[in-house]
């Protein structure tokens, strides 16, 4: 266990989960299943990301989890969204805990026929708004009914029934849109209108998740997108309220805080892992954005 705690942020793959939970392997990146407390207990993992997206509806009990370093207590009728860029760390699960879960790969999401602007919104939804919703009973029942229909249809995939794949993708699309509608009812809804600037912001946010350790300048991302840095920052500010530089820095600081608080990596190694030129440059960057130097932050957590 001590050896694990000294590793960088882990990545939980959909193949590992499929093997651990004995999930049907004919669904091509889409899995619906129930879990009990033992199956939900991932506390043995260090903080991790995944190579897939997931939706979890708690049907009984409680789960304590940190999502991007913020603590949440998930209870009955809570629904939580995890995307591949979300850092999470499960801490405690009550013995009576139960959940119904949907796992799906990025490929399945983008091949599902959902309009690209909607799929793009989901891709980083948990980074824009609160990832946890409390559902009313009729909302919970509706989501559970849609998940049940989706699960029944996945069981027919191997039988080569006519139009099964097409029906499955339409059911999946309807569920994702239904969940999107629930988030639209929040006090600060996330709205996608499909403008050129929003398209640019979507592409940038996906690139940042993939490249933030290697590329830290707005200019580099603007070059990748064939636009000016000013246009890029205007686009991200209109969508998220933050400049492109702010978003890059947020990703770096979040990663650094997780490594400082949960790993045994020396600060110099963390600086190297995040591709800073040296420990001094990293420490200066961290103090500017976190208000503390890395060693003080580590002692405070």
Image (tube, rainbow, N blue to C red):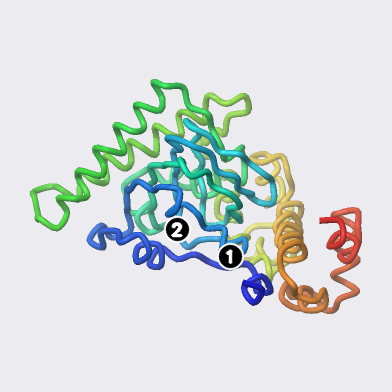
- Left or right position of 216 against 147: right
**Crowd around label 2: few <14 · some 14–19 · many ≥20 (10 Å):** many
Find residue 52 and name its label.
2
Question: Foreground: 138 or 247?
Answer: 138
Residue 73 vs residue 122, the one in the foreground: 73
On screen, residue 277 above or below 87:
below
Name the spot of residue 152 as percent of width and height, x first.
Answer: 20, 43
- Image point (32%, 48%), residue name: 32
Of discs 1 and 2, which sits in the foreground? 2
In the displayed structure image, the side of residue 255 where residue 159 appears, left or right: left
Contact flag, marks 1 and 2 (Cβ < 8 Å): no
Which quadrant holds the C terminus? Answer: bottom right
Q: Position of residue 109 (x, y in %)?
A: 38, 51
**SS state under label 2:** strand
How packed mark 1 is, by other alpha carbons closer than 10 Å (few <14, some 14-19, many 20 or more), is few
Q: Residue at x 87, y 61 (%)?
A: 299
**Quadrant of the image occupied by residue 245:** bottom right
* Residue 236, placed above or below residue 207: above
How far apart, in angstroms, are the residues tagged by discs 1 and 2? Answer: 14 Å
- The kind of secondary structure element at disc 1 is helix
Residue 99 or 267: which is nearer the viewer? 99
Identify the residue under disc 1.
210
**Image quarter hosting the N terminus:** bottom right
Q: Is 267 displayed left or right of 54 in the figure?
A: right
């Amino acid at each position: 266990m001590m050896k694990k705690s000294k590793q960088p942020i882990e990545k939980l793959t959909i193949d590992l989960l499929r093997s651990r939970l004995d999930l049907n392997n004919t669904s091509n990146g889409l899995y619906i299943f129930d879990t009990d407390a033992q199956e939900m207990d991932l506390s043995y993992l260090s903080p991790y990301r995944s190579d897939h997206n997931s939706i979890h509806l708690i049907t009984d009990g409680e789960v304590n989890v940190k999502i991007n370093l913020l603590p949440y207590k998930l209870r009955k009728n809570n629904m939580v969204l995890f995307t591949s860029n979300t850092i999470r760390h499960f801490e405690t699960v009550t013995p009576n805990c139960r959940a119904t879960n949907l796992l799906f790969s990025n490929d399945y999401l983008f091949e599902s026929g959902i309009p690209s602007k909607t799929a793009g919104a989901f891709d980083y939804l948990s980074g824009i708004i609160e990832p946890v919703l409390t559902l009313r009973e009729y909302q919970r029942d509706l989501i559970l009914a849609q998940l049940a229909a989706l699960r029944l249809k996945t069981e027919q995939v191997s039988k080569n029934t006519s139009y099964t794949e097409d029906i499955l993708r339409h059911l999946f699309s309807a569920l994702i849109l239904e969940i999107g509608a629930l988030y639209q009812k929040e006090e600060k809804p996330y709205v996608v209108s499909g403008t050129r600037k929003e398209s640019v912001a979507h592409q940038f946010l996906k690139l940042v998740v993939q490249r933030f350790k290697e590329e830290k300048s707005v200019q580099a991302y603007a070059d990748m997108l064939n636009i000016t840095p000013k246009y890029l920052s205007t686009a991200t500010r209109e969508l998220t309220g933050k400049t492109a530089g702010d978003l890059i820095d947020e990703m770096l600081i979040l990663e650094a805080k997780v490594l400082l608080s949960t790993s045994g990596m020396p600060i110099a190694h963390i600086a190297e892992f995040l591709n800073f030129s040296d420990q001094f440059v990293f420490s200066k960057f961290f103090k500017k954005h976190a208000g503390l130097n890395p060693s003080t932050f580590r002692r405070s957590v």
